[in-house]
Amino acid sequence: MAEATDLDKPEKTGNALVDDVAARIRERIMSGEIPIGAQLRQAELAGDFGVSRTPIREALRQLQSGGLIEVLPNRGAVVRVPAPWEVREAYEVRAELEALAATRSVSRITDSELEALRAANQEMYDRSSGKGGEPTASPRPANDVFHTLILTIAANARLAKAVNDINETFPRNVSAQLIVNDARQREENFREHERIVAALAAGDVERAGREMREHVMKAGEHLAHWYERRSSTVFRG
C-alpha cells in the first residue's frame, strides 16, 4: 500500500486552520521570535503562512482571548507585556503545583531518572554559561527537561497539564535569557536544582517539596522584576 504524502492529506480549513495558525503564532511568541511589545501585522503573517487574512484575524482573536496579545489604539494587535502581579500570581500557583510534583516523585523516582535530572541540570548550566563555546540564547530545553521529567515521574496528568497551562501564559524565552545574562542567577538556578535532586535522592518528601517551592517562587520573582523593567520601556501607543 502506497505511503501517504503531504500532498495526499486534505488541507486544513475552518476552525482547524484557525487553530493551526494560532498555534504557529503562539510558538513564535513563546520562542521570542516575535518579541513582547511587537506588532502582529495580518498581511505579513498571511504571507508567511500562505493563508488569507481571515484565519489570521480569527487566530489573533483567539490569542487575544487567551491573554497572549492585546489590541491597542493606533497600533493594532501586539504581543502583550504581562503585568508583574500576573507573573507573581501565576508562579505562586505553579510553585505549589511543582512542589506537589516533587513530593509525589520521591517514592517513584529511579536511579536512572536521578541521573537524567543531573544531566539536564548540567546541560542547562553549560549551555547558558558558554562552557566549550559561546553562551547559547536558549538553555530552555534542558531547563524544561528538568522540570518536565519531575512532572512525568509524579504520574498525575492533571497536575502536569495545570503546570503547562501556566507556563504557556508567558513567553518562555524570557526566563531563559535571564539565566544566560545573569551569572549569579544562573549559579543559583543550578544549585537550587541540585538541592531538589539531593532531596529526591534522599527520599525526603518534605525537603523535596520545600526546595521546589522556593525555587519556583524565586524564578517567578526574577521574572516579575524583569517585566517591571520591561513594561516601562515598551512603547504602548
Image: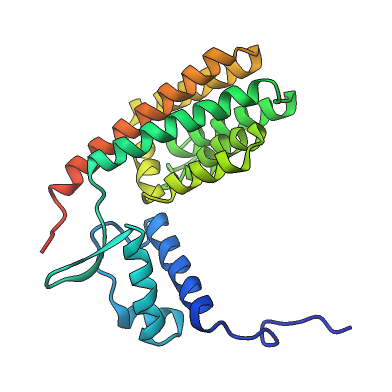
User: Does residue 23 appear left or right of residue 84 in this picture?
Assistant: right
Q: How many marks?
A: 0
Against 165, is 12 above or below? Answer: below
Residue 88 placement (x, y as % from top left): 30, 35
User: Does residue 44 appear left or right of residue 107 in this picture?
Assistant: left
In the image shown, does 107 or 192 lie closer to the viewer?
107
Q: Is residue 79 visible?
A: yes
Residue 77 placement (x, y as % from top left): 25, 69
Q: Quadrant of residue 43?
A: bottom left
Residue 206 placement (x, y as % from top left): 54, 13
Location of the N terminus (image quadrant): bottom right
| Residue at 24 percent of width and 52 percent of height | 81
User: Does residue 38 appear left or right of residue 202 in this picture?
Assistant: left
| Residue at 56 percent of width and 82 percent of height | 12
In the image shown, does 61 or 204 lie closer to the viewer?
61
User: Does residue 100 appear left or right of residue 76 in this picture?
Assistant: right
In the image shown, does 60 or 221 lie closer to the viewer?
60
Location of the C terminus (image quadrant): bottom left
